[in-house]
Amino acid sequence: MKSELSAVDVHFLVRELQKLVGARVQRAYGISQEEVYFQFHKEGKHLLRVKLPGVAYLAEHRPDFPKNPSGFIMFLRKRLNNARVKGIRQIGMDRIIIFDLEGKFQEKIMNYELIIELVAPGNVLLIGQKPVKGGTLSDPVILHLLTPQSYKDRTLRGGIAYEAPPAPTNIRTDDEDKLIEAVTNSGMDMLVKALAVGLSLGGEYAELVCKRAGLDKTKAKLEKTDIKKAIAEAKKLLDDTAKPLTNKKEVILFPEKGTEGTHHETMSEALEERFGDVEETTSEKKVKKGKKGTILEQQQQQKTGLETSAKENHRRGELIYEQYQEVQEIINQIKAGEEPS
């Protein structure tokens, strides 16, 4: 990926995020309308960075957050403080991540869906129930969201039910006939393009599937046998283990042998290397300055110690030289096995 996550990338990110199941939401932070952070706690702190329109990952770098958070961030803090992560999932094969949360509000146990849309222009929404007359709760609605939006087929604003974008084909759950039909009717004049659109793979992974399946990606005639091979290979890909690598241009989850770049233990680590180009925070600068000061102090102490040691050794040398005859006689007596006089 070069600038944003594809549906396949989101699939692998959601797999990596499973470590947060059972975690507690500690805090929400907002940098801007395009950048939101969520801090979780589970055997230590975990910081999820959401950089709209199309990137999310677990970050190591912690920026300086604004002292005056927006109304949306304050609402999230109020509703989600100490909420427990019950599950994390992807909507079909779309670029949408849902955190299923359980929290407590006004002495009632509440269930929420924290939705992160990585489909341009991107959004973050909190879905839940609202108290209504008679002490009951409404059906789930959008309680608050980062940015109200209106599209041809749906509207995102507070107080109404959430609608996801029209669902693309889902290679994990759709039957083979439906997938073959989607590829055949994609309107593309080349196999790799038809797979990219019809199977919701995107260009990068459609190319990889063609290569792994031994198919001619430039083939114009879409044959059923080729599509079946591609479907089988695409399903294998989703079960594969990513081996993230970064270079100057992009993040590659499945690099070919010999691809130059830096290998990473996790997808998030690779994403931060690629998309985490941010300035050092004030606190980080202070820590670094403190470390430099400590190092300089240690170096000065070492220098002083060496100077003192050198002076002492120099004086020892002078004493040995001054008493050379006596020292030499003692050495000779020891060599001869005699008692020094």
Image: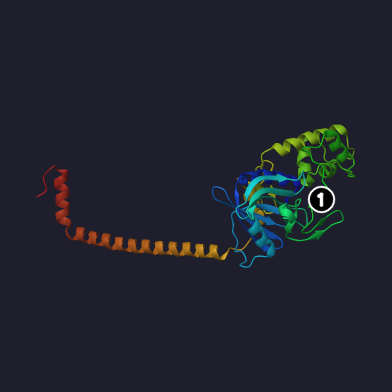
Q: Is residue 152 visible?
A: yes
Q: Is residue 127 visible?
A: no
Residue ID at (64%, 59%):
78
* Figure quadrant of residue 277: bottom right
* Figure quadrant of residue 241: top right
- State the colouring used for the structure image: rainbow
Residue 289 location (% of width, % of height): 49, 65
Is 251 left, or right, of 303 in this rendering? right
User: How many badges with numbers are in the image?
Assistant: 1
Q: Residue furthest top?
A: 225
Residue 194 location (% of width, % of height): 85, 42
Residue ID at (26%, 61%):
312
Q: Which residue carries the number 1 mark?
A: 165
**Label 1 is placed on what type of residue?**
Pro
Is 214 left, or right, of 102 in this rendering? right
User: Closest to the observer: 79 or 208?
Assistant: 79
SS category of the residue bearing label 1? loop
User: Closest to the observer: 188 or 108?
Assistant: 108
Is 334 left, or right, of 296 in this rendering? left
